[in-house]
Image: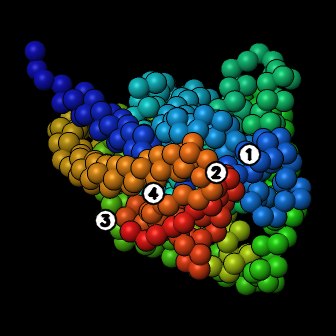
């Protein structure tokens, strides 16, 4: 019996990508409270969960305009340290699961027999490289406030479409299910302006396409058009809630007049162009595209009817254009308000869009090439090239694993400081001696600083939370 190299290549790739997302999930074990988290925690403790959430309407100090961040921060804080440790693994798991489910649904709607294992293969690869290629992994995934603001909405995005596309399998759309989709979109849009703009843009495009299909009496459109409209309404309402929140008005005063229409369009062109030029110049993105082309050539299933290569390449081009459009949408809030690129922790949003575009377009291109060059020997060559390209994810696993000792050291320092504060509280003391933790090695700032230093506001929030004075010394 001959060795099946194609199957080996598939299993190897699946194992690598799952190991990658598993490693990122494991790093969540070292999560602790940091920066803005203390301010949220102080409000949850002193005001209670409901009043803290209601503070969206009037509180311009700790509670920001992003109501979904406040809601989920409170849910995580209810479980204290365990909640912090679980938030990253749950985010990664639901992110992969949502993408895989969505790919599976879309494949069925378009006539492709995509296996669940293959859907997981693609989804795990996209999530892993979306995280790995983001410029500020710690603030995007391991700091609660940053993760909820910029990465959690990327988990909601596919799940909104999962439940919309799931309606295509039902004989009659469920009203209760549609109401659930509205709530999901309202929550998914309430994490940040950048992600909400992407959600509204994506739902708007889907609703437009579904509307055309609805007029043509296509089955999938007849069943998903109304749920898509309802989801779009929820996302637009979320955008309005973010835009008119008191805290947003305070931020607008700080930044001054927003960019005018012409200036905004120029800035968006410049920022989007720079983003993709830098992405293409980065050899890592090139390797990701090549790996996707090889994978699509080998693993992408053909339709029941014969595929047309030019039609598939056109679809790959449309996927690329869609990615460009959505990246532009994600950059729009920062360009409009700040006239600049968003902070590094925000870049995980356009990075996820770009990686998804590269991977899906790459898979479609691989399928087209397979239809054009139907040569058995070429298949063997592509298998060898794909196996060789796995050196890239293997290397990234090594780089990611090297973060473990750094994260672990910071966590030990945090736990020692926490023990000192709790000991002072148990003894009835009014003041505790603590040492500032330097967050620079993991991409943060000092968690606690003496008065007059950069991070003193964090110390103030922590003192409100613990209800004790803190005397901070530098390490």
Q: For the residues carrying marks 3 and 2, which lies nearer the camera in this image?
A: 2
Q: Quadrant of the N terminus?
A: top left
Residue that mark 1 sits on: 44
Q: For the residues carrying marks 1 and 2, which lies nearer the camera in this image?
A: 2
Q: Distance between the residues labelled 1 and 4?
A: 27 Å
Res. 62 image quadrant = bottom right
Tell me whether the residue at label 1 lies in contact with that at label 4, contact meaning CB atoms closer than 8 angstroms.
no
Tell me whether the residue at label 3 lies in contact with that at label 1, contact meaning CB atoms closer than 8 angstroms.
no
Q: Distance between the residues labelled 4 and 3?
A: 19 Å
Q: How far apart are marks 4 and 2 (CA)?
A: 29 Å
Residue that mark 4 sits on: 137
Label 4 or label 3, whichever comes before in sequence order: 4
Residue that mark 2 sits on: 466
User: Which sits in the foreground, 71 or 432?
Assistant: 432
Q: For the residues carrying marks 4 and 3, which lies nearer the camera in this image?
A: 4
Classify mark 3: residues with Cα within 10 Å, few (<14), some (14-19) or many (20+): few
Q: For the residues carrying marks 1 and 4, which lies nearer the camera in this image?
A: 1
């Amino acid at each position: 019996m001959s060795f099946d190299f194609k199957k080996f290549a598939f299993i190897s790739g699946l194992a690598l990508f799952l190991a990658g997302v598993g490693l990122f999930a494991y790093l969540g074990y070292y999560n602790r409270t940091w920066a803005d988290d203390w301010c949220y925690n102080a409000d949850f403790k002193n005001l209670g969960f409901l009043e803290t959430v209601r503070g969206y309407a009037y509180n311009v100090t700790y509670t920001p305009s992003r109501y979904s961040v406040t809601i989920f921060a409170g849910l995580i804080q209810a479980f204290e340290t365990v909640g912090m440790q679980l938030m990253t693994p749950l985010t990664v798991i639901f992110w992969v699961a949502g993408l895989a489910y969505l790919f599976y649904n879309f494949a069925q709607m378009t006539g492709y027999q995509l296996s669940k294992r293959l859907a997981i293969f693609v989804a795990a690869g996209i999530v892993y490289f979306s995280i790995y290629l983001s410029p500020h992994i710690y603030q995007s995934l391991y700091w609660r406030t940053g993760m909820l603001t910029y990465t959690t909405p990327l988990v909601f995005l596919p799940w909104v479409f999962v439940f919309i596309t799931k309606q295509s399998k039902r004989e009659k759309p469920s009203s209760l299910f549609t109401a659930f989709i509205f709530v999901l979109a309202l929550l998914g849009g309430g994490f940040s302006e950048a992600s909400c703009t992407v959600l509204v843009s994506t739902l708007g495009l889907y609703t437009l396409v579904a509307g055309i299909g609805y007029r043509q009496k296509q089955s999938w459109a007849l069943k998903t058009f109304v749920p898509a409209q309802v989801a779009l309404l929820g996302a637009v309402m979320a955008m309005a809630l973010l835009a008119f929140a008191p805290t947003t008005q305070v931020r607008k005063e700080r930044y001054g007049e927003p960019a005018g229409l012409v200036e905004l369009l120029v800035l968006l062109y410049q920022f989007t162009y720079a983003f993709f030029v830098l992405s293409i110049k980065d050899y890592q993105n090139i390797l990701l595209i090549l790996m996707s082309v090889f994978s699509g050539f080998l693993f992408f299933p053909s339709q029941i009817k014969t595929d047309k290569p030019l039609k598939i390449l056109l679809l790959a081009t449309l996927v690329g254009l869609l990615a460009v459009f959505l990246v532009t949408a994600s950059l729009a809030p920062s360009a409009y308000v700040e006239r600049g690129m968003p902070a590094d922790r925000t870049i995980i949003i356009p990075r996820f869009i770009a990686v998804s575009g590269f991977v899906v377009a790459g898979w479609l291109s691989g399928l087209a090439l397979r239809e054009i060059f139907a040569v058995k020997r070429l298949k063997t060559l592509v298998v060898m090239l794909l196996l060789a390209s796995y050196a890239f994810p293997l290397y990234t696993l090594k780089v990611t694993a090297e973060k473990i000792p750094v994260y672990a050291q910071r966590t030990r320092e945090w736990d020692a400081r926490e023990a000192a504060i709790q000991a002072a509280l148990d003894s009835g003391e009014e003041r505790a001696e603590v040492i500032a933790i330097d967050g620079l090695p993991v991409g943060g700032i000092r968690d606690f600083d003496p008065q007059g230093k950069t991070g003193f506001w964090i110390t103030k929030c922590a003192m409100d939370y613990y209800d004790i004075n803190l005397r901070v010394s530098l390490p």
